[in-house]
């Protein structure tokens, strides 16, 4: 790969390798400066982080709270070339013990398993643009807390932050839209139809034995579980603007055809659905969906957004009171 260290066999090897070096081998300091641009833009549902020093601080804080965290790279779905830069959509399954006090509160000693998906733009051996979604609601639930109550308490304590929205986003160096591949187009069409309330697409496009992974650490099987998730999300934000930001499709040796789509919803919480009583709060949902396809349709799906970030936006709009009440 031109511009990259020759020890990396290919782009997935680079993404998987530097993740392990940074997190598990404690490759902070010089390694972070090598792999992250000094002006890197990292967008998370809870806010935007600017610059490598901020990313290093955040990594250290997470490792302090979860010192035995292991990041298992389930897949890297990617597009681009070394010359123009490449975009990886990296799905990670983490295991960790909540061993010390930190962002999630006093240490619980709980053993956690949760996912994250990171879309990273890399060129010349450095990441300079990133979109990162962690399943914070899944982590919170495993610690014995309710994501809504946790988010409201955080806002009441003055830790609501500045959530990511189109108004708080920061432009980065990557302007690509992905690649031209039939599997990416198929997933984009599927999501677009779902967000147009065409839920009849689910039994038509999903394998009857599909395996589904959704926010909050929720697993499901079969089209009925997909219907419950997508209907609940769209019903909560019935008039929100749906936008597809990035689409990748791939066919690789020894793997099922697969796709990654980054998308968003931006609009008012004015319907009954996944977020309870309508509040009218203006909500931004940043989501990433990975899918694998088989002979009978979509057979595996992973969709992720940060449910706690949604609750924080609702709490901020309502003016959260101490104790977590709106």
Image: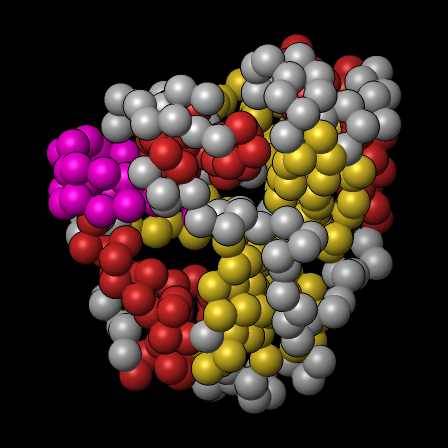
How is the rendered protein coloured? secondary structure
Image coords of residue 59 (percent x, y) = 31, 61
Image coords of residue 133 (percent x, y) = 51, 47
Q: Residue at x 14, y 45 (%)?
A: 100
Quarter of the image holding residue 123?
Answer: bottom right
Q: Is residue 18 visible?
A: yes
Question: Which stretch is magenta?
Answer: 90-113
Placement of 270 over or under 64, stated as above or below:
above
Question: Which one is nearer the viewer's eye here, 181 or 277?
Answer: 277
Q: Residue furthest bottom?
A: 3
Question: Which one is nearer the viewer's eye here, 155 or 38?
Answer: 155
Q: Is residue 206 visible?
A: no
Placement of 101 over or under 215, stated as above or below:
below
Q: Residue at x 59, y 61 (%)?
A: 88
Image coords of residue 171 (percent x, y) = 67, 69
Q: Is 198 left, or right, of 278 in this rendering? A: right
Q: Is 139 left, or right, of 263 in this rendering? A: left
Q: Is 213 left, or right, of 115 in this rendering? A: right
Q: Residue at x 63, y 59 (%)?
A: 169
Q: Residue at x 62, y 57 (%)?
A: 168
Quarter of the image holding residue 270?
Answer: top right
Placement of 164 over or under 206, stated as above or below:
below
Residue 112 lies in the magenta stretch: yes
Image coords of residue 291 (percent x, y) = 65, 38
Residue 50 lies in the magenta stretch: no
């Amino acid at each position: 790969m031109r511009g990259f260290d020759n020890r990396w066999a290919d782009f997935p090897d680079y993404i998987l390798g530097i993740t392990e070096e940074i997190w598990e081998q404690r490759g902070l300091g010089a390694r972070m400066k090598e792999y992250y641009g000094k002006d890197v833009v990292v967008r998370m549902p809870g806010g935007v982080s600017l610059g490598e020093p901020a990313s290093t601080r955040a990594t250290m804080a997470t490792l302090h709270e979860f010192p035995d965290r292991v990041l298992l790279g389930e897949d890297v779905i990617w597009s681009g070339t070394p010359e123009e830069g490449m975009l990886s959509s990296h799905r990670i399954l983490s295991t960790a013990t909540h061993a010390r006090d930190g962002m999630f509160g006093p240490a619980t000693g709980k053993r956690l398993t949760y996912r994250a998906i990171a879309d990273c733009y890399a060129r010349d051996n450095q990441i300079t643009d990133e979109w990162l979604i962690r399943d914070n609601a899944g982590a919170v639930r495993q610690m014995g807390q309710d994501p809504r109550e946790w988010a409201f308490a955080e806002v009441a304590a003055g830790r609501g932050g500045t959530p990511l929205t189109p108004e708080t986003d920061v432009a980065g160096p990557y302007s690509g839209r992905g690649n031209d591949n039939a599997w990416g187009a198929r997933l984009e069409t599927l999501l677009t139809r779902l967000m147009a309330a065409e839920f009849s697409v689910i039994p038509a496009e999903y394998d009857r034995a599909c395996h589904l992974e959704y926010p909050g650490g929720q697993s499901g099987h079969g089209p009925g579980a997909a219907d419950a998730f997508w209907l609940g999300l769209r019903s909560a934000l019935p008039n929100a603007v749906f936008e597809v930001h990035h689409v990748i499709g791939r066919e690789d040796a020894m793997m099922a055809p697969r796709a990654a789509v980054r998308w968003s919803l931006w609009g008012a919480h004015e319907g009954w659905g996944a977020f309870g009583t309508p509040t009218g709060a203006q909500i931004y949902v940043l989501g990433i969906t990975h899918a694998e396809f088989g002979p009978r349709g979509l057979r595996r799906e992973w969709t992720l957004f940060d449910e706690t970030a949604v609750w924080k936006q609702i709490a901020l709009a309502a003016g959260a009171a101490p104790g977590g009440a709106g």
